[in-house]
Image (tube, rainbow, N blue to C red):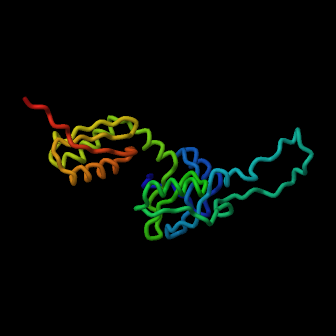
Amino acid sequence: MSEVPVTVRTDTPVKTAAALLVEHGITALPVLDGEDYPLGTVTELDLVRDRFPRDPRYSNEDREQPAPPETVGELISARITGIEPETDVTDLVKVLLEERVRSVAVIDEQRLVGMITGRDLVRTLARDDDLLARDIRYRLSFIGGPRRWSIRVSGGVAVIVDEFDSPEDRHVARVLAESVPGVLRATCSAAEPTATG
């Protein structure tokens, strides 16, 4: 999530808003009022609508077209797609897909606190397996120490082996592992007993 989202006001010029989108590599800007409450959003498609005249070499249309909007306030979509900070990532993906939006505002007590984009989710999905294993190892080091757990991650799937035989701890280990951003799922089992004799 971008915790300091780029925002605009209703009086922001369209050209300034377009430059912000390009500079920050984003596709939408939250529009805030004077007290920083979200009013809606303006997207890259909102900004380009009616801004490009037809090529006069190939068109017989009247050149006297109405002037395009000059400020974001004239283009704002009053509908803002927002989620709460505690929203589960599966619900976030559902919102992105069902609403057909590329970014979602994170709103806490009617205040904009961040933005999440599809690119943020892809970046999380692409995290290196070795980094995921390291993050899981760190989280599990608080349960029985760092040597207790054997951790292997492949394609975002974590396989954890517990040196001790504690079903309760293995459940906690699986939950902790699956809370690591980028881990798709985790399994946890007890170490197989070594043969004696």
Give the percent coordinates (x, y) of residue 153: 33, 37
Residue drawn where x is 20% and y is 39% of the image: 191
For this rendering, which residue is in front, 167 or 91?
167
Residue drawn where x is 14% and y is 33% of the image: 194
Q: Quadrant of residue 128?
A: top left
Q: Residue furthest top?
A: 197
Give the percent coordinates (x, y) of residue 16: 61, 52
For this rendering, which residue is in front, 60 or 187?
187
Q: Residue furthest left?
A: 197
Q: Quadrant of the C terminus?
A: top left
Asked whether, in this view, residue 189 is left or right of residue 125, the answer is left
Asked whether, in this view, residue 5 is left or right of residue 69, the answer is left
Asked whether, in this view, residue 96 is left or right of residue 121, the answer is right
Residue drawn where x is 22% and y is 51% of the image: 167
For this rendering, which residue is in front, 184 or 33?
184
Give the percent coordinates (x, y) of residue 124: 42, 44
Give the percent coordinates (x, y) of residue 69: 72, 58
